[in-house]
Structures are given as structure tokens and as C-alpha cells.
Amino acid sequence: MQRDSHDSAAPPDLTVLIPTHNRGDLLEACLIGLQRSNGVTLEVIVVDDASSEDLSPIRSRHPEVGWIRSNENVGYAAANNLGQRGARGRHVVYLNSDVEVEPDCLRMLLDELERRPAVGAILPLHIGPDGEPQPILSPEHTLGMAWLRDSALHLAFPRLPVFRRWTMSSLDLGAPAEVATAQTSCMVVRGQALGAVGGMDPDLFLFYNDVDLCRRLRSAGWTILYYPQARVLHHGGATTQALGWREAQLWRDRYRFFGKHYGRAGCLGVRVACMTRAIARTAAQLPRLRFRQIGDRWAVGMRLYGALGSLSNGPDPPPTP
């Protein structure tokens, strides 16, 4: 592991943590966006999570950026924790490398955070490349949702009230709101709040680490504020879409999260959801008599179910991407 540091006398307003794994083009755009930030002092730390792509040209073009290099892929949560260890900022920004902040975004978030002492974390409106707002908010991840949503029944019955509440379709995305759960693709976390709960859970390799963090913040008495007056451009999963193991890792992390917070009942709920989804995907091919697709869909479902590991030991370790 290797780290560059850039010390100055006064602590910066914000330490920005950017885990990255390949896709140097997105990382460079992210760093350029941060350079244009107004009215806020920043410490920027990139955590290179064992990229196979050579990111050294970007590193040389941005000497003001601290740099940590992990020689093995430790995952999104653990990479953020690596950067957080030496953070000097009064507050911490979790920022995905596929996000570009608008010039006034971080200043607006910081001002609102300091104006509201009960807020532990604040996040902006996320706009996709198509110009549309992105769904980055969700209600509490309850045990019922381990089956109701993750079994994919919300796709078959999207108008049911329980699923409409999950998608938060009635939320006014143009108005600030306290929320239960939000993605950490761009989130400012109060230093005091983060000190109280610690960093992300490194056992949640890629997914559900944001859900877990939000839950722990709220359990410690902090609120989470969605503040759409501040905006970012989010390319939306561009750094993970090409990973063939992505869905299996999603189920592994889902299994860990629900097991952590709901025990054996949580593990069983995720198992039932995984099996239900496999059956639904397979059954969808039966009316068309697509026998090859029937076999393929069932094989995929069983592979995902197998990724959960045993009920007693939990998920298998994640594969190397």
C-alpha cells in the first residue's frame, strides 16, 4: 500500500474520498470537477483499489491529490475506510469516481450541514447523463423487503401500495427531505457523526454498505438530509456494469446485510427471495417453450443461490474481479 500526503496548517473543510477501480476517464472528470469547486477547502484522497489500468498519468496530472494504492481489491467499503484513516477534513465526503460535482455543490451541502446540527449526512440531487434525476433514495430496508422487493415481485405488481412506497414515487425530488437510506455516490458526512459510528462495514464488499451506514447513523440519533438544490452528474454504475460477478456479489452483500441486522430470519428471507426470483425468471420462459433459455435461467438462479454460501457460515468470499 502506498500513500501520498499533502499537509497544510489549517484542516480543510472537507476530505473527499474517491475509491476507484479502473476507468481512469471517469476519475479524471471527477477530479476536474472538484478543482472547480467554489467556497470550500478540500483534501482529496484517491484510493486505487488494485486497478489493472495504469492510472499513473492521472496521478501525475493532479499532484494536489493524495493517493493510496491497494495491491489487492478490497472492495468499495474497505477502500473508503483506507482513505478515511488519515483524513484531516472537518467532515468527510464519500464520492464515487463516476460522479462530477457542480462548482457550488459541496459549498451548498457544507453550508446546509452546518446550519442543521441534527443532520449527520447530506446528499445532493443526482442527475444522469440523460438529464433525468436518478433514484438514489429508498425507505428502510426491512425484513419484509428482503422477500417482497428482492424476489422481483415489484416488477410484476408495480402499482401495489407497498411497492409504490418502496420506489418513493410520491416524493417531490425538488424539495429537501429527511430520508432513511441513500446511496453514498456523493454524500457529505459530519465528522462528529462519522466518529460516532466508524466507517463503512468492510464485510459489505460492494453493495449495501451505504444502507448499513445510513442505518447506523440513524440509530445513533442523526438524520440524513436529501438536498436537491445541490447537484451532481452521476454516470450511474459505470464502474461496475462490466463486472460479470456483479449480480452474485449483490446477493452476497444482501445476505450479509440482512443477516447482520435480522439474524437467521434475515438470512432465510434473502434465501427465499433468491429462490423465488430464480423460479419467476425460469417460469417466464415456459409459455414460449424456449427450452434452452429455461435451462439457462434456472442455472443462473442456482448459481446466484449458491453464492449465498451455507446458512451457518454465510456467503463465500467475493471472487477477484
Image: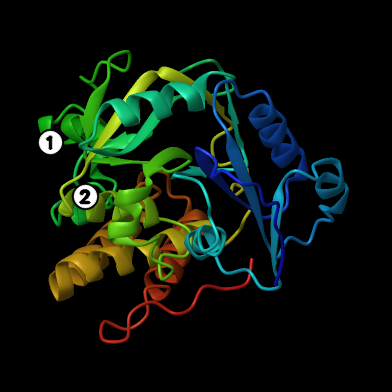
Q: Earlier in the sequence, mark 1 or mark 2?
A: 2
- Left or right position of 42 against 220: right
Q: Is residue 281 above or below residue 274?
A: above
- In the rendered image, the quadrant that contains the C terminus is bottom right
- Left or right position of 63 against 321: right
For badge 2, the amino acid type reads His
Q: Is residue 52 above or below residue 88?
A: below
Given residues 204 and 151, the one toward you in this image is 204
Circles 1 and 2, Cβ within 8 Å, touching? The answer is: no
Total marks shown come to 2
User: Disc 2 marks which residue?
Assistant: 141
Q: Position of residue 153 (x, y in %)?
A: 23, 44
Residue in the image at 28% along x and 58% along y: 196
Given residues 271 and 28, the one toward you in this image is 28
For badge 1, the amino acid type reads Val
Q: Is residue 268 above or below residue 244?
A: below
Residues at marks 1 and 2, CA–CA distance in whole angstroms: 13 Å
Instruction: Tell me if residue 95 can be seen.
Output: no
Q: How many residues crowd mark 2 within 10 Å: few (<14), some (14–19), many (20+)?
A: some
Choose top left, top right, bottom left or bottom right for residue 309: bottom left
Q: Secondary structure at mark 2?
A: loop
